[in-house]
Amino acid sequence: MMIKHKVNLSISKFLPVVTLLALIPIWEVTVRIFDVPNFLLPAPSVIYRAFMDVEFSRWGIHLWATLRVAILGFCLSLFISLPLAIFMVKSKFLTKTLYPILVVIQSTPVVAIAPLLVVIMGAGEAPRLAITCLITFFPLVVSATTGMMSTPQELIELSKSLKASAIKEVWHIRLPYAVPHIFSGMKVAITLAIIGAVVAEFVAAEQGLGYFVQFSTSYFKIPQAFAALLLLSTLSLLLFKTVQLIQYLFFRWSLPKDRF
């Protein structure tokens, strides 16, 4: 039974890839049968040719520009959100004060405030990092706070009875319980980081895949825009898998038992 379970689990891992590969010929045939214009929905073969028509060095420049902003914005958000979550867990006053503000910030469309950030911070990399950080910030804070608050109260009381310091309580008790929640938030945030980088490039950028999409569509080079979109999706998936790999390598104990 154990071997059968592992085989089924291995097969299930490849189902998304098989499904995607099966959709490509269906997409190609459908577009050709109904003679859909390229400016509406290009066929996969047309998108591939458009991708190959662009120099790989040019793709590399735009890819690196988007990846750099996404990772830096994500790391900045993580660096801010974890200490803030700890402070919110330790202080009910901060929770009641900051949480509504965080909800308001999250509810505000970043696309609407992106031009304001460019005006305030200039047209450099700073507004792009700020936009990415704003988009990724909320899920990280909420997941870390929820995880630390889910620590069993008996353990908290036991640590207090042993006169453990607040730092030890957080480091040895609350944070380990929060690790699964933190990684759940990180998986959401790392994909949002790509969205944030693209939104920022729509507003103010001269490089990046978001800029390339906007440039291509403005000149009605729709197959090239689709190629950039597929590259963005691949990049987002790879970053998501990277976070999963980090959790598997360094925090394997935080994964569900059926994942082994």
Image (spheres, grey):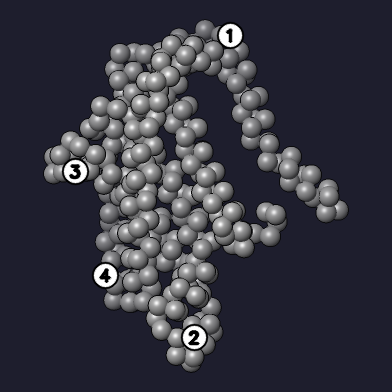
On the image, the x and y values in percent for residue 20 come to 61, 28
Labelled disc at residue 33? 1
Q: Which label's residue is closer to the chain start, 2 or 4?
A: 4
Say which amino acid is labelled 4.
Answer: Thr
Q: Residues within 10 Å of mark 4 (few under 14, many from 20)?
A: few
Say which amino acid is labelled 3.
Answer: Leu
Q: Name the residue under label 4.
A: 97
Q: Which label's residue is closer to the chain start, 4 or 3?
A: 4
Question: Closest to the observer: 210 or 102?
Answer: 210
Q: Residues within 10 Å of mark 2 (few under 14, many from 20)?
A: some
**Which dot, 3 or 1, sits closer to the camera?**
3
| Mark 3: secondary structure | helix
| Mark 2: secondary structure | helix
Q: Which label's residue is closer to the chain start, 1 or 2?
A: 1
Q: In this view, does 253 lie to the left or right of 150?
A: right
Instruction: Determine the CA span between mark 3 and mark 1.
Output: 47 Å
On the image, the x and y values in percent for residue 234 come to 50, 32
Instruction: Determine the CA span between mark 4 and mark 1.
Output: 59 Å
Residue lying furthest front: 57
Instruction: Determine the CA span between mark 2 and mark 3.
Output: 45 Å
